[in-house]
Image: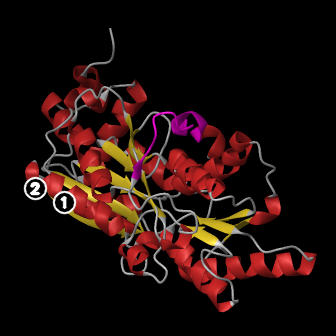
Amino acid sequence: MGTTIRDVAQAANVSIGTVSRALKNQPGLSEATRTRIVEVARTLGYDSAQLRPRIRRLTFLLHRQHNNFSASPFFSHVLHGVEQACREHAIVPALLTAGPADDTVQQLRLHAPDAIAVAGFVEPETLNALVALQRPLVLIDLWAQGLRSVNIDNAAGAALAMHHLFGMGRRRVAFIGGSLAHYSIAQRALGYRRAFFEAGLLFDPSLETTIDGGLDPDTGATHAMQRLLDAARARGDAPPDAVFAYNDAAALAAMRVCLAAGLRVPEDVAIIGFDDIAGASHAAPSLSTIAVDKEALGRRGVELLLEETPVTPEIVLPVRLIERASTAALMAANTPQTTPPNTPSNTNANAPQALAAQAQST
């Protein structure tokens, strides 16, 4: 027979009710007592899911690098989805932003959440500390083995973008990426490279570049696009005839560099992004992109937390290709396309290889 709550109570020299309150994160205990009981339960191998509490308070944890909603609005929409689902289920949400130098666990204790939703990138050490809290936990735009997660089909989205560009006759397709420590970016980069193989085309690694660490997407992508143009000029090669950027902010920055260099979009260089932020449709020319239901990411995250025994702990949401003026040269129609059923994609199967060091849109 497995370890029982009575075993934990005896080992910690407290009552069964005290163990229950500690593992359910209920008030009435000192933090030292709660921490000691949680450690005893973990040491004995007690499955605290047996005492899964009703979720009344949810903390939405966002890394500080994502906390610039005006420049990178992706996660503001995800947060809206979380808030909507919380209202429907009478849950009080709270937002916590943290960086690598912060004591995230201590800040969470002040929030006293019943459950935690982590969105985007976090350091592996932070994720391990969150798992050790033994609270219901869901990852949004993030992945780790054995944890509940909600992601978009990043690999299929990259395939849609690349097949669209190949269909226009573009062959020198560059990719502007970000840190591969980000789960979604790593999957998009993987989809970019795989698309050449699937199309029977030669992949040129000189056409793949990454924005400089520490720079915002706009500045980093500006430098990255300029590097691509300068490198082609130095080699005596033609510039890329298309660019796939890991998100729309990077794609828009790349477009400005190309236009400033006298290149016509899309005649000389077609450009496509990812995420479908509001600025994509308002750009001149308007930006083709892979559309993501960002609110649905947040909603499904909350719903997955509330499931006692989910059918699948890993949810992958579909994406759509939206064709606009930045790839309009041979555009067949101005209607969105949904992810085709036969689009090559095996996001979760490739996650461990793509992200060996990080569990972890955008």
Q: Is residue 122 above or below residue 37?
A: below
Q: Is residue 9 magenta?
A: no
Separation of disc 1 and disc 2 at Cα? 6 Å
Residue closer to the observer: 241 or 101: 241
Residue 356 in view of the camera:
no
Q: Is residue 232 visible?
A: yes
Q: Say whether residue 100 is left or right of residue 309.
A: right
Instruction: State the mark number for residue 346.
Output: none
Q: Residue furthest right?
A: 235
Which residue is depicted at the point 53% across and 68% down? 328
Q: Which residues are magenta?
A: 337-351
Q: Which secondary structure lies at badge 1?
A: helix
Q: Quadrant of residue 262?
A: bottom right
**Residue 248 x/y as whole percent:** 49, 70
Residue drawn at point x = 52 percent, y = 62 percent: 331
Residue designated by label 2: 87
In percent of width and height, residue 188 lies at 58, 53
Report the residue at 32% width, 8% height from top.
1
State the residue at coordinates (76%, 75%).
228
Task: Out of 178 and 28, give the one closest to the viewer.
Answer: 178
- In the image, taking residue 166 as reference, residue 54 lies left or right, namely left
Q: Amino acid at mark 1?
A: Glu
Q: Position of residue 342 (x, y in %)?
A: 51, 33
Which label is found at residue 83?
Answer: 1
Q: How many marks?
A: 2
| Mark 1 crowdedness (10 Å alpha carbons): few <14, some 14-19, many ≥20 | many
Image x and y of residue 109, in percent: 28, 58
Amino acid residing under circle 2: Arg
**Mark 2 and mark 1 in contact (Cβ < 8 Å)?**
yes
Secondary structure beneath disc 2? Answer: helix
**Render colour scheme:** secondary structure
